[in-house]
Amino acid sequence: MSATARGQGQGKADRAGAAEALRRMAEALKSGAVMLDLQCPVCSSPLFRLRSGEIWCVKCQKRVIVVKEGEEPITAMSDLLLASLEETLLRKLQELNKAMRDEEDIGRLTELTRLISGLLDNLEKVRRISRRRR
Ligand SMILES: [Zn+2]
């Protein structure tokens, strides 16, 4: 686990008992937070994604920053979003492919090539994340 707790509301964690933590978890769920399959790096309790998008440890009452690239999206992104992203990327690639076929200006071709390369990178990332979720 490569998350790291940072900042906000320190000091409370030590005094918070398990019952208190449970109560806060219930509260978080009630307010629309989603429990993630990530653990707090400090206290190992399950982390929540708040409606604001922040990842939060209810026990430490700290915001948790997920450091490793690609780690947060894996837990936070829905399969639906990933599928939609993949589709969008493919559609753009198709458009760029067409544009490249008719393009004769070298500068423009270079730009298109760079765009396609970036899209392919993203496509690969999306697919890698999708695979890891399964
Ligand atoms: Zn914690």
Image (spheres, rainbow, N blue to C red):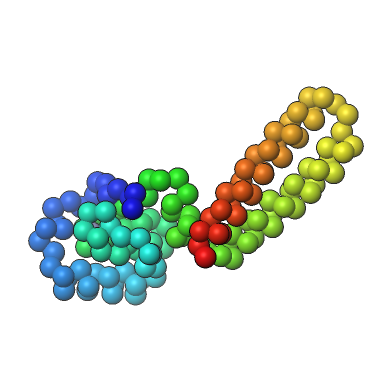
Residue 73 location in percent, x, y?
Answer: 48, 55
Q: Is residue 75 above or below residue 4?
A: below
Residue 112 location in percent, x, y?
Answer: 75, 35
Q: Is residue 14 left or right of residue 131?
A: left
Q: Is residue 131 visible?
A: yes
Residue 31 location in percent, x, y?
Answer: 35, 71
Question: Please, which residue is most extreme toward the left here?
Answer: 15
Q: Is residue 51 left or right of residue 132?
A: left
**In which of the image's four quarters is ligand 1 placed?**
bottom left
Could you say which is closer to the camera, residue 116 or residue 10?
A: 116
Quarter where residue 98 is shown? top right
* Residue depicted at 80% across the width and 47% down the height: 95
Q: Is residue 104 above or below residue 76?
A: above
Q: Is residue 111 left or right of residue 68?
A: right
Number of numbered discs on residues:
0
* Residue depicted at 30% across the width and 48% down the height: 4
* Residue depicted at 61% across the width and 48% down the height: 124
Q: Is residue 50 visible?
A: no
Residue 78 location in percent, x, y?
Answer: 53, 64
Quarter where residue 21 is shown? bottom left
Could you say which is closer to the camera, residue 19 or residue 75?
A: 75
Q: Is residue 30 above or below residue 3?
A: below
Q: Is residue 109 left or right of residue 1?
A: right
Question: Please, which residue is most extreme toward the top here?
Answer: 106
